[in-house]
Amino acid sequence: MHDVEFSIDLVPGAGPVSVAPYRMAPAELVELKKQIEDLLEKQMVRPSVSPWGAPVLLVKKKDGGARLCVDYRQLNKLTIKNKYPLPRIDDLMDQLRGASVFSKIDLRSGYHQIRVKESDIPKTAFRTRSFVGLAGYYRRFIEGFSRIVMPLTQLTRKDQPFVWTDACEQSFQELKRRLTTSPVLVLPDTNEHFDVFCDASHQGLGCVLMQGGRVVAYASRQLKNHERNYHTHDLELVAVVFALKSWRHYLYGARFSVFSDHKSLKYLFDQKELNMRQRRWMEFLKDFDFQLIGRICMPYDSELRRAVLEEGHMSRLSIHPGMTKMYQDIKKSFWWPGMKKEIAEFVAACLTC
């Protein structure tokens, strides 16, 4: 349709709008690059230095493929809408009376069939980004961030009087210490296997992303008011969903493992009786390829816990690891309240170490 040009008329006083690009998973970036190179080859798009910019995203198609879409919502808010009346489908159907031959036409890549007016082309510019392994907020570098900052968060709530307590001061000082201490993290390798560790309590959610026994990132948040009424298995499921949303740009399209305390989560995919909230979470999880692994919750038995600690520290396979390594090894299979503190005390009391 080269004889028709599409114009984009803006409301008076409208200026260029540029929106930051969305973050994507490595598998999505490969597909995005492939589709953009195809559009460049067909001369449907071209490199741009326009002050305008819209983010792009990939939307799943029914056949399992991905459709490249540009989010022009901010541009649409500034356009003068075309009020030309569209023909009614039922009126068109009425005109078919007496016809005996019917046909239809479907244009491939329909959104690229009409040329945009040359002066309006800069308005349609879109932006992409490359995969950045280490980015985001400081909270990803701080273990238990939401727990540490909780006293300060409560001060910002509605109708909460501002009272600087000892707990607020301790929270403030601890945050300063954490922000000025170099965290021991590793850059993610998208070719290596990821392990996601999730935990939940009636105070908040905590997650750790690891590769090869080393921490890549932390994530945590406090529970919302309505979430405090959830049952334990729902809280554990919320923690898994929260972790996968936080690190979707690493995990989407990759095979990874999820470690959770609650064994009932392993059977949720096979249950038929789910409430609407659980169904929504399960639909989200189906987009990921992961293995759910449960840990054994140890009973309050000092001899049994002592045996686990000795096996994790002095067996032929462990050979006196440090506190951090020992904790990371044991928590893959066992958990009990205060386990990290007990491990630290056990290692400190070891004469060999």
Image (spheres, rainbow, N blue to C red):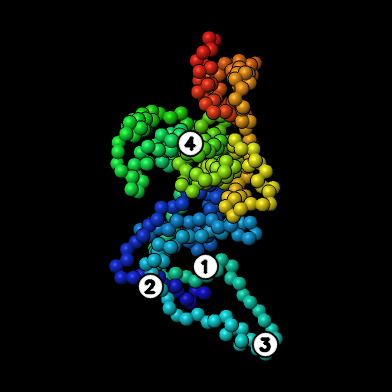
- Please state which amino acid type lies under the numbered disc 3: Ala
Work out whether mark 4 precedes mark 1 in sequence or the reverse, and give the earlier one.
1
- Please state which amino acid type lies under the numbered disc 2: Ile
> Of circles 1 and 2, which is in front?
2
Label of residue 99 in the image: 3
The reply to whether residue 1 is in sight is: yes
Work out whether mark 3 precedes mark 2 in sequence or the reverse, and give the earlier one.
2
Quarter-of-image position of residue 315: top right
Left or right, 256 with reference to 270 = left
Which residue lies at the image location 44% right of the left edge and 62% below the top edge? 72
- Please state which amino acid type lies under the numbered disc 1: Tyr
- Please state which amino acid type lies under the numbered disc 4: Tyr
Label of residue 111 in the image: 1
- Callouts 2 and 4 close, C-beta under 8 Å: no
- Percent across and percent down for residue 188 are 52, 36
Q: Which residue, given by chain and number where applicable, does mark 4 sit on? A: 218
Image height of 159 relative to 293, above or below = below
CA separation in Å, label 3 and label 2: 39 Å
Q: Which residue, given by chain and number where applicable, does mark 2 sit on? A: 80
**Residue extending furthest bottom?**
98
Neighbour class for label 3 at 10 Å: few (<14), some, many (≥20)? few
CA separation in Å, label 1 and label 2: 20 Å
> Of circles 4 and 1, which is in front?
4
Which residue lies at the image location 49% right of the left edge and 32% below the top edge? 186
Neighbour class for label 4 at 10 Å: few (<14), some, many (≥20)? many
CA separation in Å, label 4 and label 3: 66 Å
CA separation in Å, label 2 and label 4: 46 Å
